[in-house]
Each structure stands twice: as structure tokens, then as C-alpha cells.
Image (cartoon, grey):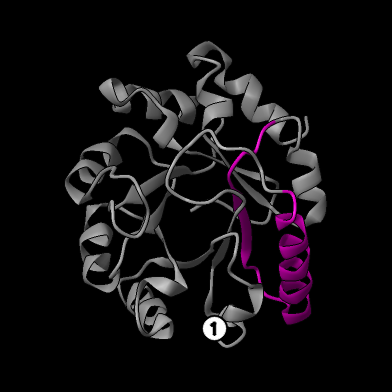
Amino acid sequence: MADFMSEILISPSILSADFACLGEEIRAIDAAGADMIHVDVMDGHFVPNLTLGPPILAKLKPHSNKPFDVHLMISPVDQWLEQFADAGADIITAHPEAGPHFHRTIQAIKALGKKAGAALNPHTPPDVLDYVIEELDLILVMSVNPGFGGQSFIENQLHKIEALRKRVDQLGTNTIIEVDGGVTPANAQTVIDAGANALVSGSAIFKAGPQGYAEVISALRGR
């Protein structure tokens, strides 16, 4: 696994990749400097879209040695954890609203030997994590409403990022604060300044084409 605190981590979202050649796309973003591979899993129920399941993840896993950062937008979520772990997820992120006992969900992810993340929708307050935050490896702040790529960044989520950074720093944990939704080179530094140390970006990276992936990834880091 990568040294998560060494620099700003970039996790390209393959939701915006060319699905006709996902293996090639993953190899290209890996070579371009991606730190993680972000996989958005949607069930058409918890969010209004349908994407991919464990069998496809298992086929994609051999195309990169980078951590697969799997965001489960599915409900109920607990029954799927083992399948996604077996398929190759390295980080499994779930929503507190996606099951009756979120602490149990985190425990189940950890028991599978995976890093555990919590995803917060735009309307979800950070204090929902008060009694589980010390057990989290990652907190994913959704800066758009989940379900579709290509949306615009919701500015008031910067306050949530700031609040979470303050809390994580107070606790002294190495919890990653990741932000997903409308992140581009134009606003990445603002998101980083608010306290994020991992950025998910889909449209901004993949619209550049393979020849432009490295340049966009570098720009997102502020280089």
C-alpha cells in the first residue's frame, strides 16, 4: 500500500473512463502517476445509477498494483462487503445510511483485512462519525450528490472538509480525508487548503485522453 501521508493522493475515478477498454485505461492512469484507482459502485437503489459489481472488479484488479479505492453506493451494504473484498478492493468505503449499524459495517470491513472508509453525502453532517471516526482509515466527502459523474463542486462542502481535518488532527490519527465530486485543477488547491489529502477526479482526468492524464494528475497535486 502507498504511504498515504507522503503527499496529495490522486485517485482517478474510472466511472469517467472508456468502459469499452477499462483495463487499458487503468494501466494508463497507473503509468500517469495515479496513487489509487477509484471504483464507484452504484446499485440503482441507493443512488440513481447502476455501474459494476464484484466480477468486473476482479477482472480489473490485475491491471494495476495500486490500491483499489472502492466506494460502495449500495444499500443494504453489509451483504456485499466480502464479495468486493474477495474481488480485489483494498479500501472499502460505505455510507452510514446504507445499513442499520455502521459500526458493525466498519468492523466487518476490518475483519476482511481491508481499510475502512466512510462516505458523507452533501447533506450528511460530519458529526455522524463522532463515535466511529477513530476506527476509520478514510473519510470520503462527497462534494456532489452521488450517482453521476461530471457534476459541479458544491462549495459549502469546504466547511465540512475543514471540520473533519480539525477533528482528525485533534485525534492524531492518519485518517485520509478524500474529496469526490467536481474536483478539477482549477479548484484542487482550495480543496487541499481546506484539509483534504486525497482527491478523486473523473471527468477532469479522462476527458484529457491518455496523452494528457499525467499532466492533469500533476496539476491536481498543485505541481
Q: Is residue 88 magenta?
A: no
Q: Is residue 173 visible?
A: yes
Residue visible at 21% across and 71% down?
79
Nearer-the-camera pick, 204 or 169: 204
Q: Residue furthest top?
A: 211
Q: Is residue 32 visible?
A: no
User: In the picture, residue 187 is in which quadrant?
Assistant: top right
Quarter in which the C terminus is drawn:
top right
| Residue kind at label 1, given as amino acid type | Val
Q: Position of residue 126 (x, y in %)?
A: 65, 73
Above or below, 97 against 48 in this view is below
Nearer-the-camera pick, 162 or 125: 125
Tell me the magenta residue range: 155-184
Residue visible at 58% across and 80% down?
128
Q: Residue furthest bottom?
A: 131
The number of discs equals 1
Q: Position of residue 186 (x, y in %)?
A: 76, 30
Q: Would you name the residue on which mark 1 appears?
A: 132
Q: Position of residue 174 (x, y in %)?
A: 65, 68
Residue visible at 38% across and 85% down?
101
Viewed as shown, does residue 192 lie left or right of 107?
right
Residue visible at 39% across and 47% down?
40
